[in-house]
Amino acid sequence: MFLQPTDVDRGNVRLERPVVDGGESAFADEAGLACRNTPPRRSTLVPMERGLRYLTAAEDLVVTDQWVARYRPADAAQYLNQVRTAVADCSPYPNASVTTVARFAGQDSLLVRIEIRAGGPAIQSDPVDYVFVRQGDLVTEFEWAGTNDAAEQVGRRAAARLCAGTPTC
């Protein structure tokens, strides 16, 4: 269900062992740095299972960290709707932008690009894409630094990997 090194096209990439309880995505924290109004809240939906895996390059740099969560029926779709609502409610600082691309992979998907430039309350950062993909009751989230096209392509590969864990494909 997790991305494999061949899915990311980033040179010599290796897998790190999945963690059974993968904790939380960094999306709410990063979006909070870009939004001047109330930062996005973490979802109240609790997954039945959640795992985290890091993909690292030869230099021990993290290429991406990926979460996969299994929700109760209908909660996976509701989770993505909560993310959409949080993004729609975001009022970015003047030095930040939050943009989205929707429904490019799986049964549902969302790419949220957060860019923070110098001159505001947060430290300048390179643009980061947060990719959310749903297949049935499974949702995967991962961070991606690069172009939207590359993030969407990896999102489609992630959707295909999720098919191993759900009968909806």
Image: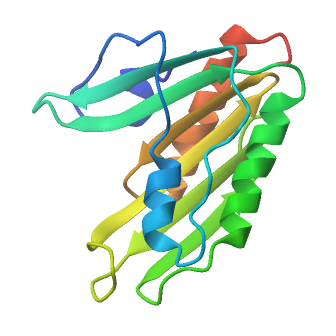
Q: Is residue 111 left or right of residue 32?
A: right
Snapshot quadrant of residue 120: bottom left
Q: Position of residue 139 (x, y in %)?
A: 68, 29
Is there any visible trace of residue 35 in the rendered image? yes
Q: Position of residue 143 (x, y in %)?
A: 44, 45
Snapshot quadrant of residue 26: top left
Q: Which of these two is toward me, 127 or 151?
A: 127
Is there any visible trace of residue 150 in the rendered image? no
Judged from this view, the residue extending furthest toward the right is 74
Q: Is residue 159 above or below residue 17?
A: below
Q: Is residue 57 above or below residue 103?
A: above
Q: Which of these two is toward me, 27 or 7?
A: 27
- Quadrant showing the C terminus: top right
Q: Is residue 25 left or right of residue 46?
A: left
Q: Is residue 47 above or below residue 39?
A: above
Q: Residue at x 41, y 12 (%)?
A: 18
Q: Which of these two is toward me, 168 or 24?
A: 24
Q: Which of these two is toward me, 131 or 169?
A: 131
Q: Residue at x 21, y 27 (%)?
A: 12
Snapshot quadrant of residue 163: top right
Q: Residue at x 72, y 45 (%)?
A: 109
- Quadrant showing the N terminus: top right
